[in-house]
Image (spheres, rainbow, N blue to C red):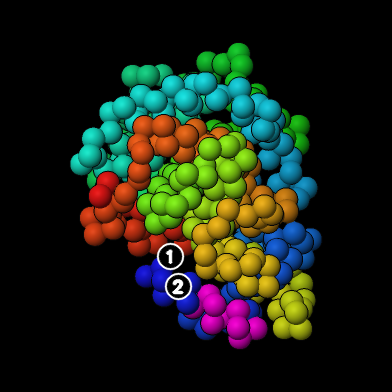
Amino acid sequence: MYDENFEHYKNARNNGGIIYNNEKHCWELYTYETCKYVLMHDDIFSSNSKYFGGNSGLSFINMDNPEHKEYRNIIAPYFMTSKINEMRQDITDISNGLIKNLQFNSDIVKDYAVELPVRVISNLLGIPKNDRGKFKEWSDYIIGNKRDANFAAINNYMIEKLSGLFSENPENGIMSVISTANVNNRNLDLNEKIGYIMLLIIGGNETTTNLITNMLKALSDNEDIINNLNTERNIHDFIEETLRYYSPIQFLPHRFAIDDTDINGIHINKGQRISVFLGSANRDENVFDKPDKFILRDRNEHIAFGRGPHMCIGAPLARLEADIALNDFLENYKKIRIDNKKSILLENPMVYGYQKMFFG
């Protein structure tokens, strides 16, 4: 599926890079220039679908400035690089424990790539240890967008548990900040608080899980690179190239033209939806030399985490977890070989990653 997608991206770029999808009723952008332009200009392109007949949801990622900035700034200090680096030892300890328990027949997705970020987010939120199994189960439902008979029970349990944590008025940490936050001279209601938690679960888990599995895939496919991963700089470059080459989020489906506008001479009507294809932008041959080759690059200005006001708030945490994971695998395995026949890619075209991954 993904090979076909990348070929489609290339064909789309070669044919102007701005295509109207009649089936989905939206404009699709495929070049680096146009994708970055839309992401940078939130004064022209809205993230809030409620203005055009949709539902904005509870998360600040579906808001525009100044409202977006006010809600984002509540938790932004906890995701600054300096603050995130305080978590390095705790994340390293979690990673060490998980990697020591990996067996040759382990599902790397289930036993490491999912487990690491879930435990990190659990720690960040102060979820009690005896509730972390339930929290992980709830996270799996939210990330997988699954809604079976058991979902209502686990959802009600976790909302009640989180409500209790908020009402306990935690003295410090991100839960305390969310619990006591004030917007427009009012406290956040419970739905808004839960919206933050759900955003952290989805953004803090899925992207990082996919980044970890994609790094292992890159190590398996590029054995010659392993010998070069002996400096902090090369580790950094490897992670950034993984983000470019295997962008964990392939496209952002919702931007809306606030008024009639043009993109590279193409007229966009007010209210029309725009999808931004990050996976295509990151392989644009006008920006990246040999874009279809995995290369450690000195300058890698990919947009895997987006750009502009809505750039992924959790990017520093994802990078730190990826750095720790990569170093741990390199220390514990002389070679990384992935069994491509047993490993299963995700079927969702919006993301790039694995449902299951096994050593080969």
Towards the viewer: 61 or 97: 97
Task: Tell me the residue that label 2 is attached to.
Answer: 5
Q: Secondary structure at mark 1?
A: loop
Residue 66 colored in magenta in the image = no
Amino acid type of disc 1? Pro
Residue 336 appears in the figure: yes
**In the rendered image, which quarter is residue 130 located in?**
top left
Task: Tell me the residue that label 1 is attached to.
Answer: 349
Instruction: Please tell me which of labels 1 and 2 falls first in the chain.
Output: 2
Question: Pointer 2: residues within 10 angstroms few (<14), some, or many (20+)?
Answer: some
Amino acid type of disc 2? Asn
Height in image: 161 above or below 342?
Answer: above
**For this view, does 173 lie left or right of residue 74?**
left
* Residue occupying the point 41% across, 32% down: 331
Residue 45, horizontal then vertical, whole percent: 72, 65
* Residue occupying the point 76% across, 72% down: 259
**For this view, does 186 lie left or right of residue 360?**
right
- From mark 1 to mark 2, how far is it between C-alphas? 8 Å
Q: Secondary structure at mark 2?
A: helix
**For this view, does 225 lie left or right of residue 130?**
right
Residue 10 colored in magenta in the image = yes
Residue 64, horizontal then vertical, whole percent: 71, 53
Q: Which residues are magenta?
A: 8-16
**In the rendered image, which quarter is residue 325 located in?**
top left
Height in image: 113 above or below 84?
Answer: below
Towards the viewer: 195 or 129: 129
Whether the residues at callouts 1 and 2 have beta carbons within 8 Å, the answer is: yes
* Residue occupying the point 60% across, 13% down: 171
Towards the viewer: 180 or 104: 104
Does the magenta stretch mainly form a helix, a strand or a loop?
helix
Towards the viewer: 72 or 1: 1
